[in-house]
Amino acid sequence: MEVSTKNFQQYCNSLVAYKRRKTIPVKIGGVTIGGDNAIVLQSMTTVDTMDTEGSIEQSIRMIDAGCQLVRITAPSIKEAENLRAIKEGLEKRGYFTPLVADIHFTPNAAELAAKIVEKVRVNPGNYADKKKFENIEYTDESYKAELDRIKKRFKPLIKICKEHGTAIRIGTNHGSLSDRIMSRYGDTPFGMVESALEFIRICEEMEFYDIVVSMKSSNPQVMVQAYRLLVQKLDEEGLKPYPLHLGVTEAGEAEDGRIKSSVGIGTLLEDGLGDTIRVSLTEEPEEEIPVAKVLADRYKEREGHDEIPIIDNCLFNPYEYEKRASRKVGNIGGKEVPIVMADFSLKKDITPASFFGVGYNYSVPLDKWSISDFACDYIFTNDKPVEFEIPGTLGIVHAHKTWLKEKEKERRFPFIDPKDYLSDVEMHPKLNFIYAILADLSDEFIAKLKNDSTAVLLIDTYNNHGLAEQRRLFMELMQKTCDVPVVIGRAYQNLSLEKLQLYSATDMGGLLIDGFGDGVFIAAENCGGDKAINETAFNILQASRTRISKTEYISCPSCGRTLFDLQETTAMIRNRTNHLKGVKIGIMGCIVNGPGEMADADYGYVGSGKGKITLYKGQEVMKRGVPFEKAVDELIEIIRQDGKWLEPQEA
């Protein structure tokens, strides 16, 4: 599949002005997705679909929390038929929220469900294809024969949906691409998009347009690239602008799941993409809705923000990750991982105990510092001196006037505003943090930055559409061939910790996904404690795959197919393995979402039968049918044999 590189803005209305992408409206019962309608919030039940009363009760909790579409798995004919009883039970209780049947592998179940519920989700990767992880050589003729086979299998569902007014979500998952797609396009956003387009073309050939499309992945970077590419390919082929269902699969639990979801979903929402969202958390489904609402509500008043200069020449590729080239200044820029700067500017006093929340713990008896994986790299104190010996891995950043008094101390660096910088004030011989917003980037300012081997730019924004303004700033630097390292700074006030996590993950994660930024600086007033804010910064870098500081868990949100308690099991595995920095472990409830959705995991723990677990190393099955009670120990043994296990005290 070829990608046009002439106009990267084709995937959204504008890289600088916020405007929702205009999509066709798709009616799903009493809810309409797309068009001029607000972003629709949805989630998925986790109880067994054959548990009629349990499904009804859980659906009601979801709806009462604000869920506008309820998705229920229907892996076979019997579950599809039971959707009727669930629907009738909800209506008797006064709930008429549209239901969506989630189908994998079983077209017959989809065809039955389409006569009962308002929408059917099909996965192109396994609706008419199988996945055996085989590489198949296709000629153009043999590939066309496969497409004809798929068309024959898919057309009956389209016919039923047309007759019953049922919508279809064509939901591609990165981890469940068919062997056919993988063989021709690889495990790529290109393959994800083509997988969906094959089904969309069949729908349009039959003049069926009640379609919603999704491009989900557990990797936010892949997910963002795939959605952008989908929009461009729909436009290029003259296909209709279908509404987009956004989601990061298997995002996980707690702050990890929220931040990872925000990096993926928020990045696309910033560009006006997305008509319905589902935040996939390893928690009760009603807990997903408030998170989705916070993400969606942010864009109700986004249009009409301060004007941002147009980007005439876009110099980054939104479909492939490539980090912006920057020179190395100290430990910032170049090939260094992004740094984290903590904000101590509002503290009355700074003592050794103050550093505990940002990863440094001082032992008085031993007279030494212990340093955690979440130890920040710099602390901004503004006008406050630090009167004690600091850890050897830490730098202190002072306002310029304070730095003049502190400059003889080791690892003290100045924070300089644009006016002073252009006035040639005294500077540190090795590292200086220069503050700037987009409006400060005059030709004189950039010219000085280009010739200053000690400068690191710390950027800020006061624009309501801040990500776009800061992206525009990066464009200006790139157009002027200025390779100064850049720390992304954002300021927040009076937010709950959860809102801070969601907002900052969107604002900074979106830039990091595009290859921008050599560090992050969250200035958060009355938004939570130092420890939580500092960990948020590290979690954003982890979610954007730019700095790995801890074990990563790819954990599905559970559904009616799940064969064990996912929340309890995830917590148990995390408790035993969370010291394995940089290791990725997939925890999947069933074989449907198992091997595929943990595509880039190092190890996998997948439900394969009642009380039975299959364990993976990458995509390779290592042990089948392991009793649940022994599975975590066996997983650890696989990691040990692979040479990646450390005892907790060694980590």
Image (cartoon, helix red, strand yellow):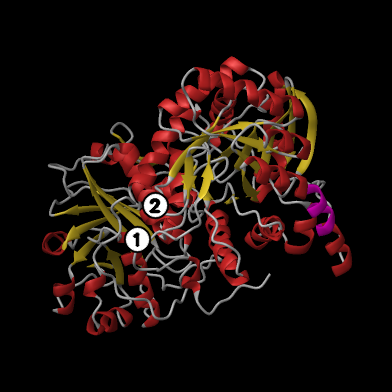
How many labels sit on residues?
A: 2
Q: Secondary structure at mark 1?
A: helix
**Residue 161, relative to residue 136: is it above or below?**
above
Residue 190 percent location from the top left of the image: 65, 63
In the shown orientation, is residue 644 left or right of residue 144? left
Q: In front: 640, or 288?
A: 288
For label 1, the residue is 467
Q: Earlier in the sequence, mark 2 or mark 1?
A: 1
In the shown orientation, is residue 263 left or right of residue 482? right
**Residue 2, relative to residue 60: is it above or below?**
below
Which mark is drawn over residue 442? none
Residue 196 percent location from the top left of the image: 66, 56
Circle 1 crowding by C-alpha within 10 Å: few under 14, some 14–19, many from 20: many
Q: In front: 48, or 235?
A: 235
Q: Residue at x 32, y 50 (%)?
A: 300
Residue 373 percent location from the top left of the image: 44, 43
**Residue 527, relative to residue 417: is it above or below?**
above
Q: Quadrant of the N terminus?
A: bottom right
User: What is the spatial separation of the Cα atoms under label 2 and label 1, in whole angstroms?
Assistant: 8 Å
Q: Residue at x 14, y 74 (%)?
A: 419
Give the residue at the far top of this rendering.
53
Q: Looking at the image, can residue 635 be seen?
A: yes
**Are the residues flagged by discs 2 and 1 in contact, CB closer than 8 Å?**
yes
**Given the image, on which type of amino acid does mark 1 rest?**
Leu
First to last magenta residue range: 147-153
Residue 523 percent location from the top left of the image: 25, 50
